[in-house]
Amino acid sequence: NAGVTQTPKFQVLKTGQSMTLQCAQDMNHEYMSWYRQDPGMGLRLIHYSVGAGITDQGEVPNGYNVSRSTTEDFPLRLLSAAPSQTSVYFCASSYWYRGSGANVLTFGAGSRLTVL
Amino acid sequence: DAKTTQPTSMDCAEGRAANLPCNHSTISGNEYVYWYRQIHSQGPQYIIHGLKNNETNEMASLIITEDRKSSTLILPHATLRDTAVYYCIVRTIQGAQKLVFGQGTRLTINP
């Protein structure tokens, strides 16, 4: 298993440009989510999905769109990038930990985005 | 969801046990305690979780007090590779995929 794969690893954008951060998982996980992490801070939830065709907003959804057409993929779209979106973005997927019923996240390696 | 309080930073000597405390005095009966760590800007890594009983896996042990108001993550024989930020998170099963990360504890393992 490759786990959670994020592309690209690094990206530089100009203000107003659009782009899509890709996230794919091969573990057949139902849940997928996107977080952002600003320097010196913890992760904040942007959007999440509980299954194909279902998405919902997290703590900081403004400026981002998501869709979930397949179980495997959960792309994050920036429609008009702003300097405030400079951050490291992490995608995660999760399964039900059958031993205790809890839900454990597996994270990707991150995508570092700089908006000039 | 219950709020957690962790020390900002801790140091531990290599080879010794690292004990990371977490207070969650407002935890409710259906909330689990999760521990994740983040090694130098990598994606966070799951370590362990528990509800009431103490738990142990190949990475660590989790000790939860009887009143569940605090817990301790124990890395039994810390190595330099355990240097990371450790996050203690309290969530219900239903909310566990929407984790809220605080500042965590920056653990430094010294040679």
Image (cartoon, coloured by chain):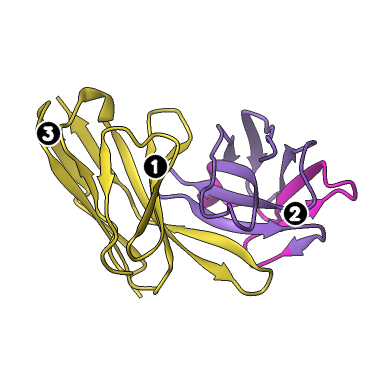
Chain colours: A yellow, B purple
Residue holding disc 2:
B30
Residue shown at the point (62%, 62%) measured from the top left: B59
Categorize mark 3 by other alpha carbons within 10 Å: few (<14), some (14-19), many (20+): some
Q: In this view, does B108 lie to the left or right of A113?
A: right
Q: Is residue B57 magenta?
A: yes
Categorize mark 1 by other alpha carbons within 10 Å: few (<14), some (14-19), many (20+): some
Q: Can residue B17 be seen in this view?
A: no
Q: In this view, does B89 lie to the left or right of B41?
A: right
Q: Can residue B92 be seen in this view?
A: yes
Contact between marks 3 and 2 (CB within 8 A): the answer is no
Residue shown at the point (32%, 39%) measured from the top left: A88
Instruction: Indicate whether B98 appears above or below A13.
Output: below
CA gap between label 3 and label 2 equals: 44 Å
Residue holding disc 1:
B41
Quadrant showing the N terminus of chain A:
bottom left
Residue shown at the point (12%, 33%) measured from the top left: A13
CA gap between label 3 and label 1 equals: 21 Å
Instruction: Indicate whether A39 appears above or below B15.
Output: above
N-terminal of the two: label 2 or label 1?
2
Quadrant showing the C terminus of chain A:
top left
Hey, what amino acid is under mark 3?
Leu
Compare residues A76 and B53 and report the one nearer the observer.
Answer: A76
Q: Is residue B62 magenta?
A: yes
Compare residues B4 and A16 and report the one nearer the observer.
Answer: A16
Q: In this view, does A73 lie to the left or right of B80?
A: left
Q: Pick out the residue farthest to the right.
A: B66
Magenta part of the chain: B56-84
Residue shown at the point (20%, 32%) measured from the top left: A114
Residue holding disc 3:
A13
Instruction: Indicate whether A7 appears above or below B25.
Output: below
